[in-house]
Each structure stands twice: as structure tokens, then as C-alpha cells.
Amino acid sequence: MDPGDLVSCNVRVRETDLYILAPRDLAPAAKGLVLQYRNQLENYIRHCPLFKSSLVPLAMDLLAPPVIKEMLSAAKAAKVGPMAAVAGVIAEFVGRDLLTMSHLDEIMVENGGYIFLQRRADCTIAIFAGPSPLSNKVGIKVPAQKMPLGICTSSATVGHSLSLGQADAVTVLASSTALADAAATRIGNEVKEKRPLAEALDTACHIPGIKGALIIRGLEIGAWGEIELVDLS
């Protein structure tokens, strides 16, 4: 994404690797927030190890911190394990806190392909789809009035995240970045080699709360919902 006049910075804490665009360098504040939310997550996993390993939704814990509740809620909606929402939830919680703490009205926080986005102008997000010939040749236009927005991409051919499918990229839009993350995992699991993309897109339209989904598999592309494609080739 073109950063325009925004300033970029990176924050890395173990598995968390944030790329942030904002009107000024927010690295020190962002690192403090990453440590805060990772500490909550790691403490909860010590208390409930199943939270880390489960591939199915877990019951809501009313006593859990908000970041954990958001992951549990996203997992329930998408019918996946709660850790399927971890990258997205950290991107959003850090992004929203930075907006409030720093009195800003624009920010982008990207965490390994999982994006929390709040901009004043329309944006176009390029889709990296690994070995697909369509990689970086297709984008999604995001109108300013639809932000803040979560934009999350899962892949079976790129990165280290667990995927049980065969999609080069599944991108999901949702108001909740945690939900977009979990839904991208779920939809990606449904993309199989000999099954039409329409079947995975049918799964997308039955996940409550998501706004749209895009799937790329090789030379195939399919979309559902509020997806405005842009030719970047």
C-alpha cells in the first residue's frame, strides 16, 4: 500500500512483527502495547493450555481480558480455534490504542498479512498470493467511509500459519480484525484442489459479521460480498 505522507516503523516482539504507518513514529508506544497484550495472551495460555492448541471454538470466558474474549468470539463465528485470530487481534488492539493515546485519526497496523486500517482517504490493498500468477496483480479498493476495517489474508503457500486448504490467498474484510483473521483461516481450509471456489465462498457468506472475501488459487479468482477489485498488472 502506498504510505502517502505517513511515517513507517517496525515493532518486533518474538512472533509479533508489526509494520505501522502513522503521522509520526509510534514505535516506542507500539512496543509497550505489544508487550502488554502478549503478556495477557501468554498468561491466559498458561492458565488454559487448550486455548493455544484447540482447532475448534472454546466456550466464552467472561473473566478473561478483552483481547481473549475477542479471540474466543471470532473463533466461535468462524468455527475455528481461537489462535486463528491472534495476529489480527493484536493488530487491531494495538492500532485502536495508538489512535486514542496519540490523538490520531489515521493509522495502519499490519501483522504478517493481517491489517487494521483507519485512513481518511480511499486505499487500494495489493494481494500477495505466493506462487500464483495473480500475486500482486490484483488489489482491493477500500473506501474511506468503510474504515476502520480489518483486512486479513491467509495462505496455504505463504508463511507459517496453519492452513488445511490449498489457497494461495484468502482475503477477508470485517469490522473486527480478529474475525477477519479467523474467517480467512476457515475459508482457506475449505479451498481444496478439486473443489470449485464457489463452495469456499459459500462458507464465507455464512460467517456472521464479515463484509467480503476474495480467494486466489493459481489462475483462479473468486469473490463474495463488498469486494471491489482493482487491476494492478
Image (tube, rainbow, N blue to C red):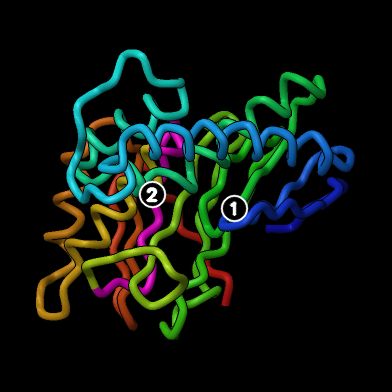
Helix, strand or loop for disc 2: strand
Q: How many marks?
A: 2
Q: Quadrant of the C terminus?
A: bottom right
Residue 172 has which mark?
2
Picture coordinates of residue 215 (x, y %)? 32, 64
Q: Amino acid at mark 1?
A: Thr
What residue is rendered at 23% in x and 41% in y?
Answer: 78
Q: Are marks 2 and 1 in contact (CB under 8 Å)?
A: no
- Residues in magenta, as a range: 166-178
Helix, strand or loop for disc 1: strand
Q: Is residue 193 magenta?
A: no
Residue 45 has which mark?
none
The correct choice, above or below, for 117 with respect to 65 in the image is below
The correct choice, above or below, for 134 with respect to 77 in the image is below
186 or 86, nearer to the observer: 86
Res 25 quadrant in image: top right
The correct choice, above or below, for 147 with respect to 10 in the image is above
Q: Left or right of 48: which side holds 97?
A: right
| 2 vs 1, front mark | 1
Q: Amino acid at mark 2?
A: Val
Q: Quadrant of the N terminus?
A: bottom right
Q: Residues within 10 Å of mark 2 (few under 14, many from 20)?
A: many
Picture coordinates of residue 26 (x, y %)? 83, 39
The residue under label 1 is 16
What residue is rendered at 79% in x and 34% in y?
Answer: 29
Picture coordinates of residue 188 (x, y %)? 27, 61
Q: Left or right of 137: which side holds 163?
A: left
Q: Earlier in the sequence, mark 2 or mark 1?
A: 1
What residue is rendered at 46% in x and 79% in y?
Answer: 130
What residue is rendered at 41% in x and 32% in y?
Answer: 44
Q: CA distance from mark 2 to mark 1?
A: 20 Å
